[in-house]
Amino acid sequence: RGAITELTFNDGKTLPLDPTLNAGTVAVMTLFSRHHSLNEWLRIMDVNSGFPFFYKNMFGDPWGRADAIGSFFPPGLTQPPMTLPIEPGRTWSYTGGPHSAWGNDGPLAAVDFAPQSDHKGCSVTTSWVLAIAPGLVVRSGNGVVVIDMDGDGSEQTGWNIMYLHIATKDRVALGQWVEQNGLIGHASCEGGNSTGTHTHIARKYNGEWMLADGPIPFVMGGWTVLAGDEPYLGKLVKDNRVVTADVYGQAWSLITREDDE
């Protein structure tokens, strides 16, 4: 989520991180910083004799591969057009502002929507979750659907959309092409931890989770996601309209999709 901005070593010293480093590189640096002093860490990270040298001999040159791929996020990258995941005319609750896309401490890339229901907790719903963007279904099972927008079959390239808590019944099949507003399935509690029927949606680009309220904000049907002070808080904003996230589905969290959204 971009929360690590410096390393702290076991001798108490600190070192600021270059913000252009990718998550994988920072993870390796952080691992060694937690077990070594700054001087030891500098020796370990030496490209001519330390871990990078060992890695290169074992698996090839990672820097060369990175140069061949080019910029992870190309200049001028923008989000493709995306719609709200609910049927026009239907009212759902915006139950979760930006929070972890996967697990408890991941990037704040996901948002939650829940269909209206008279029942608390997990219940069967006939309301459909719609595809916010077109693409190829590259994963469908265990409550998860992943749509690969460039259609190359890989979640590690281009834009991908993950839908979590999609019920087994009527869930879109692996290998199927889905148009924007196509049927993904029904919100449920399947897949991961859930205390109530909802769907959890997040974006990836080149395999990297995209912060919902980041440099490339999550926009669906003209509604822009804004983060709150804590995970799950926040708002959806469009023109002078505001919808506020609420895990209990209170009135201020209700959103009705119009035909052009």
Image (tube, rainbow, N blue to C red):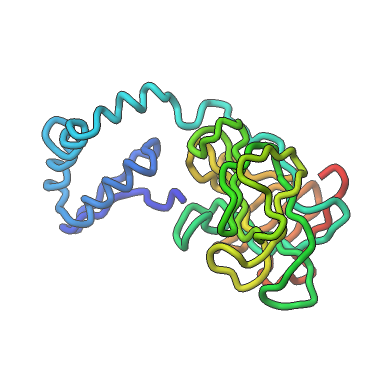
Q: Find residue 124 and report its horizontal and vertical position in percent.
A: 73, 69
**Quadrant housing residue 92:** bottom right
**Quadrant housing residue 35:** bottom left
Query: What residue is at 62 percent from the left and 40 percent from the top?
Result: 175
Q: Find residue 72 and report its horizontal and vertical position in percent.
A: 46, 31
Looking at the image, is 165 positioned above or below residue 210?
A: below
Query: What residue is at 38 percent from the left and 39 percent from the top?
Result: 22
Asked whether 9 or 251 is in front, the reply is 251
Asked whether 81 or 188 is in front, the reply is 188
The number of discs equals: 0
Q: As drawn, is 11 to the left or to the right of 115?
A: left
Query: What residue is at 59 percent from the left and 59 percent from the top?
Result: 143
Q: Is residue 227 visible?
A: no
Q: Find residue 188 and report its horizontal and vertical position in percent.
A: 67, 65
Q: Is residue 63 visible?
A: yes
Q: As drawn, is 25 to the left or to the right of 146?
A: left
Query: What residue is at 79 percent from the left and 68 percent from the top?
Result: 116
Asked whether 75 or 153 is in front, the reply is 153
Q: Find residue 13 and report its horizontal and vertical position in percent.
A: 20, 53
**Quadrant housing residue 210:** top right
Q: Residue furthest top?
A: 68
The quadrant the C terminus occupies is top right
